[in-house]
Image: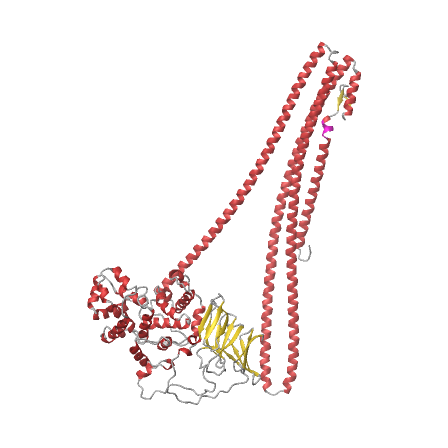
Amino acid sequence: MFVSLWVYKRDSRTLVAGGKSNHLHLWSLQLKRLVRIIQMPEKVRSVRHLEFLSDSFDGGSNKVLGVLSQDNIMRFISIESCKLLFDIGSPEEGISTAVISPNGRYIASVMENGSLNLYSVQALTQEGNKPPPAMFKVVEDGPKYTPEENKLITKVTSGKSTGPWKSKQSKIQSRLLKVQANTSLENKENELPSGLNKKRLQALLKGFGEYPAKYRMFVWRSLLQLPENHLAFSSLIDRGIHSAFVNIQKEYPIKSRKLLRVLQRTLSALAHWSAIFAETPYMPLLAFPFVKLFQNNQLICFEVVATVVVNFCQHWFEYFPNPPLNVLGMMENVLAHHDKELLRHLIKYNVTSQVYAWPLLETLLSEVLTREEWLKVFDNIFSNHPSYFLMIVVAYIICSRVPLLHCNQAADFEYFFHHRNNVDINVVIKEAYHLMEATPLDIHPQRMLDDFTPLTKGQYPVFNKYPTFIVDYQAQEWEKIRQDEIEYLRKRQLAHESEAKAQKQKAEDEAWYRKQKLLREAEEQKRKMLLEEEEKLAEQRQRLAVGKKELKVKELQLLDASRRRFLNYQQDQLQMELKRLDDEIARKASMREQETAAAVQDIELRQMELESQKKLFEQHLIKDQEGVTKEMKEEVEAHRRKVDLEDQHVQRLIEIDREETQKAHTVAEENLAKAEQKHIDTDWRLQAQRRLRRDDQDRERCYKEIVKLLHDNRVKEAELLKAMRETEEKKWEEVVHNKARLEEEQKVAAAADGHRKQFLDDKMNDALELAEKLQREDGCFESLHNFKARCTERGVEVQQVPRSGNICLDDLSTVASSPHSRRRAELARQERELMAEVRRLRQRLTSRAQTRHSPATTWSP
């Protein structure tokens, strides 16, 4: 036991200790030994605070102990009788700490919500509400108390204490003087629990008009003979809130949350007791006055309402869901006999008993009376036959005849019977007694109503005095409506989720389309820029061709006129032409470099895509490796636990064997009583073996579930690998397709380069032929030699043309484009390296997938 709290009595003779269990240990400091162990209810798991409730007349030997448990409820028990006297606090409004006044009259508690509550011990205890004991007593010999030393544990039971405030020496029992043998049967029937007599209470009531407010609740409980079935009521409460009263706050908004919860629980308990109360619309109106009156004791509240329904609401539910026409007919007959004029007036304006009597019945007169008047009326109702309740309603109507005779509209009558009126309640009570005595037997309600019958003890009686088929049909319809509402809410939730998903998908699609649009716009802009550059190049080529043509015409004209005269001029023109050719070649080279840069950017972009795919595949591989590693760790851990468990079982079997050996040696020396102990030990071993067997079976089921989960994981991994392979195949197809397109574009570019090379060869051959012709005509060998030297300086090789014997220049475009060829070779090499890396990644992925599916191979990252 983990002791965390202890408390002394005021006389310092007893110590009570409690802690992290529901047991309280009572120690006698004089005897220096454990006197008793008190076991608290099952709801108590640990004790937070202990304090004795002192009394001015016990001389310091406190016998009532307050125990504050972990559920924030403080229970007060008698340490002698071990009975639960009363408790304060609730799970909703828990107690944080509490302290008792030195005289034991008040309890101050700090609640969890920060409020401070002050309780009166006299109002909480059941003994405080009892009247003074009878004056006549007899002395009887009580049974002697023989405590058993081997039975210290005593459970705390709920119920009334047998006098925790009696003196320590009072072992004589007192009771009322026995009834004489000639007492009549009527007096025996008037005897009530707790020593009260109904006839005397009725005489007291007629003398004072009401019971004392201090003892009213006690008198009511005695008159109604409440059984206080704690277990039966707990079973009804444990069923929870009934579905018919889940949203009762919407129909009956009450400021006090505590009062609303008590009303909800009371109505739910009534509905669980009998199905008719879940379908009765006026049940909250009928129960609310008693709920407000007994809100601190829900058991008494429930039993008072149940007793009222069983006895004072007889024949109310025979015409359900209509009002009780038979009861209203009885009241109308009584009204017709005693006040025909008032009844004719009501009939004249079509005011039926459902208007002037039923509102008073279904609310138990709580709408038309004040609290004090209502309590006074029910003092008389509970003290008389159940028919008196109907008579009090008729008396109220008769005493209100003057204002009723002046009403001539249906709305006025309805308002009158739903609001408070200026009626003297004492006159109404006297009139009700007069009606009870003056009403003939043939129309008297007492002839058709049963006598008062209290609730049975232990279990509550069955209440089925209603048309069950109607209630069952309504319950079925309500259940269908609730199910339809649940289905509608579920469908609406699904619709909202679908709409949210659609909106999310729409936003993603719009973002993707915007991105694609931006990419297309950028691509179109680049294409336009390329087209503009090509147009400019074409214009330059066209102007160059026109200029060359004009230059040739002018050269022919000048050669015809004067060759010598314009020879220097021709050379200058040739130099200018060569310079223009150099500029043109430079422009073409810059254009090719731009195209090459664009191609390089595309290839780099593809390289980045391949790198990202490579990283993605590596991430998938790492995740797969982590999953497999986690599975292996779980399997190793499960195997280790299994080995530990089996070692424990083996150790336990060894210990059991050792114990059996010791027991075998002991049995030979002990007497016949030890054989019975051996039998008990054998039964215990059998139960332990059965529990071990059940443990093995549970472990086997757990292993099967683990194997099933492993199989499902393998199936899911196979599906994932298949999806990855399909994605990889698609990517390879796209790579092959893009490679084919690249080869086609390279072929087209090579063809264009060949065409340009041929064009330049033709032009250069024409220029060389023209220069050779001029050399033959003018003999200008030095000019030709200088021309060859300049071509050699620019990197152009002059060769003989075997076909015509003329001098030609090598392809200047090939020489000029040599850096471009090297760049393309470098790009091709990088592409081959990327392809090789992709093939290695694919081989690695395939090998790991095969290794994962191989059961005999264990690999680690």
Residue 125 percent across, percent down from the top left: 43, 76
Residue 371 percent across, percent down from the top left:
34, 69
Q: Position of residue 636 (x, y in %)?
A: 66, 62
Span of residues in magenta: 813-817
Q: Is residue 76 visible?
A: yes
Q: How many marks?
A: 0
Specify the quadrant of the image occupied by residue 150.
bottom right
Q: Is the magenta stretch mostly helix, strand or loop?
A: helix
- In the image, taking residue 86 as reference, residue 311 lies left or right, namely left
Q: In this view, does 293 lie above or below 705?
A: below
Look at the picture and state if 784 lies above or below 334. above
Q: Residue 334, percent across and down?
A: 23, 70
At horizontal 64% and vertical 87% (from top left) the residue drawn is 669
Quadrant of the rendering where the N terminus is positioned: bottom right
Q: Residue at x 67, y 28 (%)?
A: 752
Q: In this view, does 18 lie above or below 760?
A: below
Magenta residue check for 816: yes
